[in-house]
Amino acid sequence: MRAPGFVRDDRRVDEAPTSLLELAALFLRLGATAFGGPAAHIAMMRDEVVRRRGWLSDERFLDLLGATNLIPGPNSTEMAIHIGWARRRWAGLLVAGVSFIVPAMLITGVLGWAYVRFGRRPQVGWLLWGVKPVVVAVVLQALWNLTPAAARSWPLRAVGALAVVAACLGVNELVTLFGSAALVAALRARRPRGGAPLGQIVPVWSPTATSVALGAVSLSGLFGVFLKIGSVLFGSGYVLVAFLRADLVQRLHWLTEGQLIDAVAAGQVTPGPVFTTATFIGYLLAGPRGALVATAGIFLPAFVFVAASGPLVPKLRASPVASAFLDGLNVASLALMAVVTAQLARTAIVDVPSAVLGVTGAVLLMRFKLNATWLMLGGAAIGIGLHLVGLSR
């Protein structure tokens, strides 16, 4: 039985087929305007596909989010691919994923060209000053609306609270996710009606690391490095930095520490998935072809993983124990999202104007239902304006 509150305003989920053009238009726009990392991207997707378009219920959206957290790769990109699969299967999977990636790839590629041409990356901290407080407001709105669906019983709330504590203590996010899911499944399994054995619920694939010979940069070697990273990386952008440093700086000596820092900064200051850091590095190492090859390598596993796991999500809901496992994943995913939001708020709210911008954004979102994309653009415009008059940091 569906718990109350999964679709806002008592609207039904739109069962009519979504056109590929509409999918492409939505994710191209999100890919060009979604700043702030995976938590913000996922919040904006929820605003568009649940609240505005009614393509998914909050229950379904949470299930896809839980499944996304189980597989390696860029979470927000995988969420876009999942939504595409849910609306138009194989064609939707490709259109939504590619549309979300391409704008960020192009913007980061231009930064890579400028870096190679002029020897440094553009300084745009003033733009992010206006965007970051709005990002906090967007994520808070998503948490506010998704939490009643995920934490709809006292056991789920208790597990969510434990997940928050674990995340604050620095427990590995996979341990937090799987531990929460297993705990809820175990509690649910104590009831008279059981389900499939927990060990059969979620297969985990761990590919053999691709090795690249030390030496000159080749397109095949570049593809192999980023294919490996996209296949095994769980976690945030900070984990991505660790993988890039180990392979490209320490093992292959293709980049210097300074170049790596500039590449990561380029991925952070551009909209869309942070993994387009690969585009910048690819351009730096092998020009336009290198940018395309590195981008394809790091994002290709996401399409494969979603294609393999997406059809399983509805089947998991049919099993009582598997359904409990997903419930645990969902509440833990929101707990991790809440901790990330608190960390982001500490870096975004740095003075009174940024605090006013964040509060104003939250009011416009929650009270007046303003589109999150317009808020992002408005925050960027304010950052630019204050920079021009010399008032921003």
Image (tube, rainbow, N blue to C red):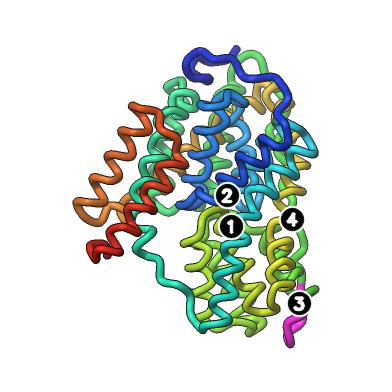
Q: Which residue is nearer to you in this view: 250 or 5?
A: 5
Of the image marks 1 and 3, the number of the one nearer the N terminus: 1
Write the start and end of the magenta stretch as one range: 211-218
Rate crowding at label 4 as few (under 14), some (14 to 19) or many (20 or more) other CA atoms within 10 Å: some
The residue beneath circle 2 is: 31
Look at discs 4 and 1 and give the one toward the viewer. 1
Which mark is on residue 212? 3
Q: Position of residue 192 (x, y in %)?
A: 63, 13
Give the residue displayed 70% in from the left and 39% down from the top. 202
Relative to 362, 182 lies left or right = right
Of the image marks 3 and 2, the number of the one nearer the N terminus: 2
Is there any visible trace of residue 105 in the rendered image? yes
Q: Which residue is nearer to you in this view: 123 or 242?
A: 123
Query: Do callouts 1 and 2 mark residues in contact (Cβ within 8 Å)?
Result: yes
Q: Residues under labels 1 and 2: Cα distance?
A: 6 Å
Query: Do callouts 4 and 3 mark residues in contact (Cβ within 8 Å)?
Result: no
The residue beneath circle 1 is: 104
Give the residue displayed 22% in from the left and 62% down from the top. 391
Q: Position of residue 108 (x, y in %)?
A: 57, 65
